[in-house]
Structures are given as structure tokens and as C-alpha cells.
Amino acid sequence: MAAESSKRSKLIDVYVSYTLSLCCSHSQRRTYQQLHLLLSGYEANTTPQHTEEILQARVDVLKNLRDPFRKPNAESRKRVDNGSVKLRDGVLVQVEQADKDFIFAISTRFNIDEVEALVLFRSFLYNEGNVLQDLESNGDDAFVQQVVDAFSPFYHAERRCLARLLVPIFRAQEDEHSFFHQQAAKILPQIIPDGPAFVQDVVDLYVEKTRAPMDKSSSNDPKLASRWAKESLRDQLVLLEVLFWAMWSFVPRQGPVVAKIYETAYETNLGSIQHNVTLLLDEEGARLLQDCAAVWLLLMVEVLELETFSDNGNPDISGPPSAEGMYTSHPDSLKRIHQLVTSHGDSNYAAVYLAWTLIVARLEAAVLALDECPPAYRSFFDSLDVQNGRPFSKNREPIHTLMFQRVLDPSVGLFNLLLSLLTTTPLFVTSIAWKTDSSISEPNAVAYRSVVKGAPCRFLHQSPKRLTS
């Protein structure tokens, strides 16, 4: 019996040693969840310079959302096996013999670098190691698997918070009154040197997660399989939030970028098309799918930048098309977005249909103000009235008036969709977020409210006739 409990006893001794002597380095004690709280302004006992120092040591990790903890490799395994590892912040740590089986098991289970497994495991022991005392030992090997199972929620939460860290950095970079503004403006370009490429990578990663097959280690256990599918969906939700905030203030809303976001939204049906959708049929799975759909709708409306046109008038289409400029200066992207929106006019997309109608109204007003339609835009304006096959003419009825009539028809359910979005989702109701333990990072954020309540309302105060005058 004593032999069977040896690993449990040794690991608890290590845990007690860490908590009492603080022998973990700062990078091992500080979780990504704690860093997120720090950057969000919930921790006052730090300075912007110290926060920047913490982040600088993690730039390489933040740059790689696909594999932030890298893959297992012989070099890292050897470093852990030798018992002495130098971490990314320069701290040299000794690896206890009692740790190694757990570290290697974590590396294997989650397919991550052995040194990263060491750091995560030490952080887990320091912050949540008390859960070990509730585990029962049924032999060393079984106990190792129990510890890895107990570690699993911590790992998934850390991986998500690593991506979620970008959100307060985006916000600090935009807000000159933020305590971290100067440091965010400095570090964000290091993390994301190419904004459009970053968006492409995040979108690709999102799509991969919707199509990913079941994790082999979970496929034979229904409970583990359901948990795995929901963890994947929570990851997707975080990626959508990162996209929202990246497009909110940092990445230019170029034509190809906006078109890619729209294509992905429709291809995945607002995230409802999942490879493992049969594992998401319970209440929790349905709620996660609903949250993803809500963020998708906000993102699709946000990237159209309605506030720019409601405040500053019509877009300038008199110059040459530009893929690098705003999406309205890229007629091919306009045509693609219009095709997607008008071919998905059902109630699920009513808010997006309305937002695009407002943009079409501004574009039509812009072309009517010119002596003639610019040649580069003629194909786009011709495509507006595909149903009737009429070429562009200033004398024809504006297409946006027909679009308004369609989307405002009671049978479409626009106002029911908006009411549901504003009153039944954690995006806008903090009490629902608390009650359901929502994975939404910041419920009822001002940015969310402004997307749904701000620019569209200013637009709708203007009649279709005034929009084209």
C-alpha cells in the first residue's frame, strides 16, 4: 500500500514545498488567467513597466495562437530529464524527480513541449495544487492519469486566456487614457506585425477547430468526448472575440479581409456547422453555439464600419480601387459581400442584411453624385440588380429601397432577432453571463452595445430617400 501511494505522497510534498517556500519562479506562479485580470485593470499592485516585462517574456507565445506551447521534442525532453531547465524569463529551475512522470504525461496528453508542460504544471501546483489532496491513489500509473485529468481544465483555461490576453492589449492600444497605453502600442506590433495576415491566421484556425475530428484520448469515453467538444467550442468563441477586438481598433478593414470574414461566417452558418455537433446537443452545448452566433453577428456588423458612413457621409468611390484601402475601395470585395448577404436573407442574418442595406444605400448615393459610374465599380453596381438583369442606371429605382422593404417585413423577424440578442445573451446581459458561467470575456461591453445600438439607429433615423440625396 505504501508503494502504491508513493507518487501521491511525493507530489503532495512537492506541492507543499512550492506553496510554503515560493520556490516557483514568477513566470511559473503567474497564470495567464491572472495576467488577463491584470491587463484588464483588476489588479492594482503592479506598474505598466512591470506588466510590459512580463509580456515581453511571452511575446513568442502570444504570436503563435495555433501552437503557443509548441510540440514535444527531444531537446526539451532531455532538458527536463537532466533536472535543470532555464525558462524564457532567464530563471533556472530544478526539476524534481517526483515531477517528471506528470510532466511527460501532460506533454503527451496535450501534445505540447516538455518545458512548457513543466511551467504549466508548476503553475497548476502553485495555484490549484490543493485539488491533489482529494485524489485517491490506486497505483502510481493510475494516479498520474488522475492528476492529468485534474490538470486538464486548468490547461484549457490557460490556453484560452493566452489568446484572450490580446483583447485588453488591443483595448489599451486604442485608449490613450489606459494605464498600459504606451506599452501596448509598443508591444502589439511585436506580437502582430501584419494585421491582415493575423486575421487570416485566426480565421483559418477557427475553421480548423470547427472541422477537427475527435481527440483520440477522448473518443472512447462519452463524458470526455462531450467535454472535448465543448472545450473546442469555447476556444472558437475566444477566437471570435479576438477577431472582434482586432478589427475594432487595430486591423484595417480592407476588402479581402472583410470578404474573408463574411465567407467564413456563412460557410460555418455562424459557427453552427461543427464536425462534432452531435456532442453539443445538451443545454450547455446549445448555449455555447448561441454565444458564437451572437459574436459572429456583432463581428459582421462591426467590420462594415457603419459609424464612419453615418457620421461622415458617403464613401469615396471616385479614385482607383485599392485592396489596401477600406473595403469600399475594393469593388471585387463589395461584389462578393453583396452576393453572400443577398443569398442569405433568412432571419438568422437579418441584422447583417440590414447593416449591408445601409452600406448599399451610401454606395448608391455616392455613385449618383458622380457624372458617371467609375468603370471599376460598374460590375458591382450591375450586380446589385441581378434578379432583374438590369445594367446600372441612375434612373432605376435604388436597390437599397427594395432591400429595406425586404428586411423590415415582419416575416423576416429582424426586430425579434435584435430583441433576443439584446435581452437573452450574455453579450448584453451581465446577469445571464454570471448565471450561466458564460465563456464571454467581458459581457455587456460598451463596444458591443455601440455596434448594435449606435450606428444602425443613427442610420435608421434617416429615410431611404434622404440616404440617396
Image: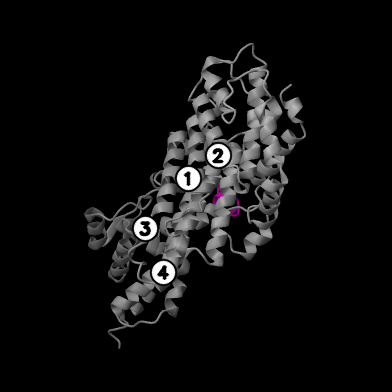
| Magenta range | 38-47
Q: Amino acid at mark 2?
A: Ser
Work out whether residue 439 or residue 286 is closer to the camera in this orientation and state it.
286
Q: Between disc 3 and disc 2, whose residue precedes? A: 3
The residue identified by callout 1 is 267
Question: Given this view, does label 1 or label 2 mark the residue nearer the observer?
Answer: 2
Indicate the quadrant where residue 463 lies: top right
Q: Give the Cα distance between marks 1 and 4.
A: 28 Å
Whether residue 42 appears in magenta in the rendering, the answer is yes
Q: Which numbered marker is on residue 224?
A: 4
Of the two numbered discs 1 and 4 on the same chain, state the one appearing first in sequence: 4
Lower position in the chain sequence, tag 1 or tag 2: 1
| Res 213 label | 3
Q: Which residue is the site of mark 2? A: 343
At which x and y percent is residue 458?
A: 74, 35
Residue 76 appears left or right of 303: left
In this rendering, the answer to whether 409 lies above or below 102 is above
Q: Is residue 30 visible?
A: no
Please say if the residues under marks 3 and 1 sit with CB atoms less than 8 Å apart: no
